[in-house]
Amino acid sequence: MYCVIMAGGSGTRFWPYSRHKRPKQLLKIVGETSMLQMTVDRLKKINTVQDVFIVTRQDLVDVIKKEITGVKPENIIIEPSGKNTAP
């Protein structure tokens, strides 16, 4: 099974805690781990998961590569433009 995490977000729905450069998926709301890392960790516990992909904005790629473990760098996909696909 392949898993895709949609992590584009513009940082507006959880304002003032999240911002454009620090959207909610990168916030550490519960404990010391970001919501995105917690999602990756949960998926990795499922035996049938072969690969995890993260779809995100261009400006978040470096932050995600630095902060998120358990996802191959080549599995971070840049969205060409935000389409508000997961309101």
Image (cartoon, rainbow, N blue to C red):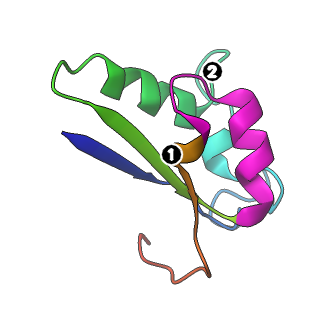
Q: Main secondary structure of the magenta part?
A: helix
Query: Eyeballing the image, is 81 above or below 57?
Result: below
Q: Which residue is mark 1?
A: 75
Front-lying residue, 39 or 17 = 39
Q: Look at the image and tell me whether residue 6 can be seen.
A: yes
Q: Which mark is residue 33?
A: 2
Q: Residue at x 49, y 26 (%)?
A: 38
Whole-angstrom CA distance, mark 1 to mark 2, is 20 Å
Residue 53 locus on image (x, y percent): 44, 46
Residue 5 locus on image (x, y percent): 42, 49
* Quadrant (top left/top right/bottom left/bottom right) for the N terminus: top left
Q: Residue at x 73, y 64 (%)?
A: 58
Q: Residue at x 61, y 39 (%)?
A: 73
Select label 1 or label 2 by which is in front.
1
| Mark 1 residue type | Asn
The tag earlier along the polypeptide, 1 or 2, is 2
Which stretch is magenta? Answer: 58-73
Q: Relative to 55, is 46 on the left or the right?
A: left
Q: Look at the image and tell me whether residue 18 can be seen.
A: no
Q: Relative to 60, is 82 on the left or the right?
A: left
Q: Residues within 10 Å of mark 2 (few under 14, many from 20)?
A: some
* Quadrant (top left/top right/bottom left/bottom right) for the C terminus: bottom left
Quarter holding residue 27: top right
Residue 43 locus on image (x, y percent): 32, 28
| Mark 2 residue type | Thr
Query: Eyeballing the image, is 67 above or below 4?
Result: above
